[in-house]
Image (tube, helix red, strand yellow):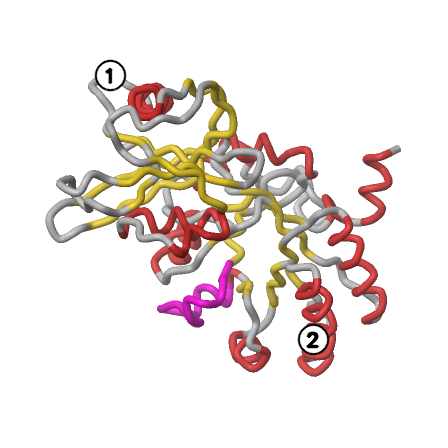
Amino acid sequence: MAVGVILNTNDEVLIALRHPDSHQGGLWEFPGGKLEPGEDITTALARELREELNLSLQKAFPLVKITHEYPDKSVLLDVWTVTEWTGEAVGQEGQEVQWVPLGELHNLEFPAANQPIVKALQLPSEIAITAAAANQNELLIDIESLIAQGVKAIQLRQKHLSVVDYKNWYLGAAALCQTWEVLLFANTEVGLADELQVPALHLSSAALLQHECRPVGEEVVISAACHNLSELQHAQAIGLDLALLSPVLPTAKYPVEHPLLGWEGFQSLAQQVNIPVYALGGLQRGDLTQAKLHGAHGIAGIGAFCIDQVKSDLS
C-alpha cells in the first residue's frame, strides 16, 4: 500500500478517520491505498491523494516501509512524506480529515500497522554527534553552538572519557539539552544509561550485536551504528528505533580508498529494513534532501555541525 504523511509548514500532519465498517474501522490513519496493476509507488500515492483528498502531489520523499501481521491479514505499507501539494484537503469519500500537531499524534488511536509511522514522525531529521572535547566546558560550548544552529537531537560521543567523567559530563549536557528541549543520546553502555535514566541511547555496532532483545524500555529512544545489512536487520529484529548507517561518503576515518556505500549503496540497504535509517559519513547539512531522496530518515554526523564547518559554509 502507498501511504502519505502530509506535513504542512506548521508541523501538522493530515490524518483521516477510517469508516466504522472497514478493517480497523473507527481508528485514525494516514491516507493512502493499494497499488493498481502497472502502477509504481509514486503514481499510486498521487492517485490516492487525488481520489481521497482532492490533493495534487508535487513532492514526496520515502519515509519508511512497514510490514505488519494482523490476525486476519498482513499488510505492507510503503510510507512517503509529502512536503508539497496543491489543493485543499477534503474527505472525498465522506471520511473525517484533520490537521493534527505532530506532538499530539500519540494521543490518538491508530491501527497497529500505523504505530511505527507515529513513532518515526517524532524523530528529528538531523542528529549531531559531539566531537571529542578537551574538557567539560568546551563540550558545553559545543553543545550550545549546536542548539543555536537549530539542532534538535545530539549524540554525546566522548570515547576518551572514563565512566566517571562521562557520567559527570553527561549530566551537565543533559541539563542544557533539557532546557532547550533537545533530545540527548548517551553513547555509552546500557548499565550506565540505566543509571542515568537517559531519554535516548546509542549503541556501537559491537554493542548492538551483543544484544538478543531490546536492552531498554520503550520509553527510551534507542539507535545503533550499522555498516551492513546484517547489522541493520539485527537492529530491526531486536526492536531498535533507528539506525545510523555509514560510511556514505569519504571522511578522515574512511578515506576515498576505503569501501564506501555511496548513495546507491545506502539506498539499497536502507530499503531492506523497516526502521528509520540515518545517513552518516562525510555529509553536510545541505545533503539532507539528497539523503531523503535515497530513503534516509535524516542525516547524522560530527563535521556537518562543527563550528569551523559552519563558519566555512557561511564564508
Q: Main secondary structure of the magenta part?
A: loop
Residue 239 visible (yes or no): yes
Q: Is residue 205 left or right of residue 150?
A: left
Does the magenta-highlighted stretch encompass residue 209?
A: yes
Pointer 2 local density, CA inside 10 Å: few below 14, some 14–19, many at least 20: some
Q: Position of residue 33 (x, y in %)?
A: 26, 30
Is disc 1 surrounded by few (<14), some (14 to 19) or many (20+) residues within 10 Å? few
Residue 65 percent across, percent down from the top left: 35, 41
For residue 17: magenta?
no
Residue 94 rendering spot, x and y as whole percentages = 25, 29
Quadrant of the rendered image containing residue 92: top left
Q: Earlier in the sequence, mark 2 or mark 1?
A: 1
Q: Which residue is mark 1?
A: 38
Question: Residue, x 31% and y 24% (percent of image)?
Answer: 48
Secondary structure state at the residue bearing disc 2: helix
The residue that mark 2 highlights is 171
Read off the magenta span. 206-223
Residue 287: quarter of image: top right
Q: Nearer the viewer, residue 52 or 127?
A: 52
Quadrant of the drawing holding the N terminus: top left
Residue 74, quarter of picture: top left
**Residue type, label 1:** Gly
Cα–Cα span, label 2 and label 1:
55 Å
Instruction: Identify residue type, mark 2.
Output: Leu
Q: Residue furthest left?
A: 72
